[in-house]
Amino acid sequence: MAKLTQSNVKGLYIPIDAVLREENASYIWLEKKPGVFEVQMVETGVETNGMIEIKSDIDASKKVVITGAYAINSEYKFRKGGDPMEGMKM
């Protein structure tokens, strides 16, 4: 038996609640400017302590929606009548 440890964990980790998951995709909402949001598909990795690794590149100038992502997603579906990931390459 061996004890595995990982020091110096690197990468981008965000709260699991910020990632919305569909059957074949995971995505996040980004704030382009105050009150204006866009969806971005992401590749996820390790989950630990309520956080999830994001392996995809994210524009550092935009803010990730941490709380309220489900509300934004629901509002989008209500207003647009569709899935925000529709038409995106999987």
Image: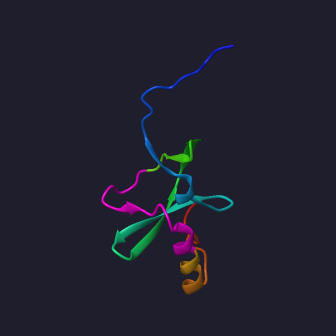
Whether residue 71 is in magenta: the answer is yes
For residue 36, what is the image quadrant?
bottom left
Q: Position of residue 74 (x, y in %)?
A: 58, 76
Whether residue 81 is in magenta: the answer is no
For residue 85, what is the image quadrant?
bottom right
Residue at 48 percent of width and 46 percent of height: 55
Q: Does residue 76 appear to the left or right of 22 in the view shown?
A: left
Q: Total marks drawn?
A: 0
Q: Which residue occupies the extreme top position in the image?
A: 1
Quadrant for the N terminus, please: top right
Residue 45 drawn above or below residue 62: above
Residue 53 drawn above or below residue 88: above
Magenta residues (range): 57-73
Residue at 57 percent of width and 69 percent of height: 70
Q: Which residue occupies the extreme left position in the image?
A: 61
Residue 53 drawn above or below residue 26: above
Q: Does residue 52 appear to the left or right of 64 in the view shown?
A: right
Q: Position of residue 17 (x, y in %)?
A: 56, 58
Q: Position of residue 28 (x, y in %)?
A: 50, 61
Quadrant for the C terminus, please: bottom right
For residue 3, what is the image quadrant?
top right
The colour style of the image is rainbow
Residue at 56 percent of width and 47 percent of height: 50
Residue at 49 percent of width and 64 percent of height: 67
